[in-house]
């Protein structure tokens, strides 16, 4: 093999299976923020970003240290960039600082500033956070089902966002989940003829994967929801268009894929028994049309939630691995993977997480945003460091003393 061919191969960004390392390079960034007043109280924030070609960055991945920033020779400068990213507070300055120091998700121009909508960028970061935290929460010894529900619905139901830079051949968009594709075609699904059932009974009998084997769907309630008339039944959110489509699919799409069907069944029962979901955001969680009846979130719904959560994780991670492609490195005679950008590398580090043995946990110190790796079996470790543990103990002691003094 010629020297030119060797150089070309060595300059690729490869994940080496034999040595268990991942490597790529990028650049630090110059950033700025433009603020435009759209109307009273409404502003649009735009991140302006440009590569600093004088400051090249090198990254490497290993199973023990995660995705790291390294020297050109491979010595670690900063461990676990994924942990740093998911620990960022949702504020512009923190996100700017991360990219200035660690490079941007995608290659950006070295010649001029490129513009990115801050809301879209924050949502991409939030999807990474939600993916990691959902994986971790599922493996917690004592699961927080409300947190799993919120993270699952955020990834599944939040509005898709896109990022397009001049230096990108095509836009990047957050995951387009299979259930959303099914939901968007609900109006084209033919309605099952229920004339006979309507004469013989007050319910439609639905094959159900949550409350097996079947569930009795009240015909009058179904017709009120689908027609939007609310003649007999009326409750908050009943006229929500997404809820209407879910109810319609629950009744009329029995032959959907198992993944779509369990998601339809779960969301139907969640909204019917607990509350109709109005909106889901990373910052505010789930917003219901009315106070949710959390007491109705029973074991059947919990079991179904875990299945749906894993379907969502599967789609979320796989859709973001498109920037990782297999290559064979002839110069080393080894199979490898090529990374095209930092975002793909971050999802690749999620791909190689070991949630069966290690998970990310949020530090229990209210003043700390850090998420740290901990053994799944260690349910007692709540703080990322002794300093956070001591600070929390001192804070609790002061509260106790103050409370006793007030008696």
Image (cartoon, grey):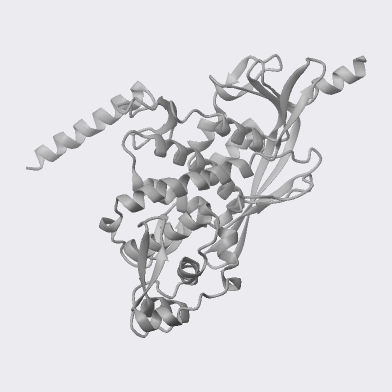
Q: Is residue 233 above or below residue 180?
A: below
Across and down, in percent, residue 317 comes to 58, 41
In the image, what residue occupies the spot 33% across and 83% down? 232
Residue with the most extreme left position: 407
Q: Is residue 296 above or below residue 121?
A: below
Residue 316 appears in which quarter of the rendering?
Answer: top right
297 horizontally vs 262: left or right: left
Q: Is residue 16 above or below residue 301?
A: above
Nearer to the camera, 136 or 247: 247
Q: How many marks?
A: 0
Q: Is residue 94 above or below residue 11?
A: below
In the picture, the quarter occupied by the N terminus is: top right
In the image, what residue occupies the spot 60% across and 67% down? 185
In the picture, the quarter occupied by the C terminus is: top left
In the image, what residue occupies the spot 56% across and 50% down? 123
Q: Would residue 22 be seen by someone viewing this image from the given angle? A: yes
Nearer to the camera, 138 or 220: 220
Residue 324 appears in which quarter of the rendering?
Answer: top right
Q: Would residue 58 be seen by someone viewing this image from the given angle? A: no
Across and down, in percent, residue 190 comes to 57, 74
300 horizontally vs 126: left or right: left
Across and down, in percent, residue 44 comes to 60, 58
């Amino acid at each position: 093999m010629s020297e030119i061919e060797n150089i070309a191969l060595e300059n690729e960004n490869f994940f080496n299976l034999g040595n268990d390392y991942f490597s790529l390079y990028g650049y630090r960034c110059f950033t700025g923020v433009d603020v435009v007043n759209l109307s009273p109280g409404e502003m649009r924030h735009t991140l302006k970003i440009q590569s600093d070609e004088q400051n090249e960055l090198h990254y490497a991945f290993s199973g023990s240290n995660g995705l790291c920033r390294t020297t050109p020779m491979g010595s670690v400068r900063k461990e676990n960039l994924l942990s740093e990213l998911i620990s960022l507070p949702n504020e512009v300055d923190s996100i700017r600082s991360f990219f200035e120091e660690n490079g941007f998700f995608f290659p950006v121009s070295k010649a001029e500033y490129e513009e990115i909508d801050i809301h879209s960028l924050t949502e991409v970061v939030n999807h990474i956070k939600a993916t990691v935290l959902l994986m971790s929460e599922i493996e917690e010894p004592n699961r927080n089902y409300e947190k799993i529900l919120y993270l699952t619905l955020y990834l599944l139901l939040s509005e898709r966002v896109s990022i397009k830079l001049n230096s990108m051949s095509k836009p990047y968009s957050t995951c387009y989940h299979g259930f959303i594709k099914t939901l968007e075609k609900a109006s084209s699904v033919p309605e099952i003829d229920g004339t006979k059932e309507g004469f013989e009974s007050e319910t439609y009998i639905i094959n159900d994967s949550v409350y097996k084997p079947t569930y009795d769907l009240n015909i009058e309630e179904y017709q009120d929801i689908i027609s939007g008339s609310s003649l007999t039944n009326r409750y908050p959110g009943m006229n929500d268009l997404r809820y209407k489509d879910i109810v319609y699919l629950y009744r009329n799409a029995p032959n959907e894929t198992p993944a779509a069907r369990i998601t339809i069944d779960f969301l139907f029962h969640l909204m019917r028994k607990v509350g109709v979901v109005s909106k889901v955001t990373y910052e505010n969680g789930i917003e219901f049309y009315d106070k949710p009846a959390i007491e109705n979130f029973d074991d059947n719904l919990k079991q179904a939630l875990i299945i749906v959560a894993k379907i969502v994780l599967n789609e979320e991670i796989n859709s973001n691995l498109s920037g990782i492609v297999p290559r064979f490195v002839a110069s080393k005679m080894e199979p490898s993977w090529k990374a095209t950008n930092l975002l793909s590398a971050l999802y690749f580090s999620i791909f190689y997480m070991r949630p069966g043995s290690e998970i990310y946990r949020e530090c229990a110190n209210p003043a700390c945003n850090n998420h740290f790796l901990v053994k799944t079996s260690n349910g007692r470790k709540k703080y990322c460091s002794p300093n956070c543990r001591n600070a929390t103990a001192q804070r609790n002691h002061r509260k106790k003393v103050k409370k006793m003094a007030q008696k």
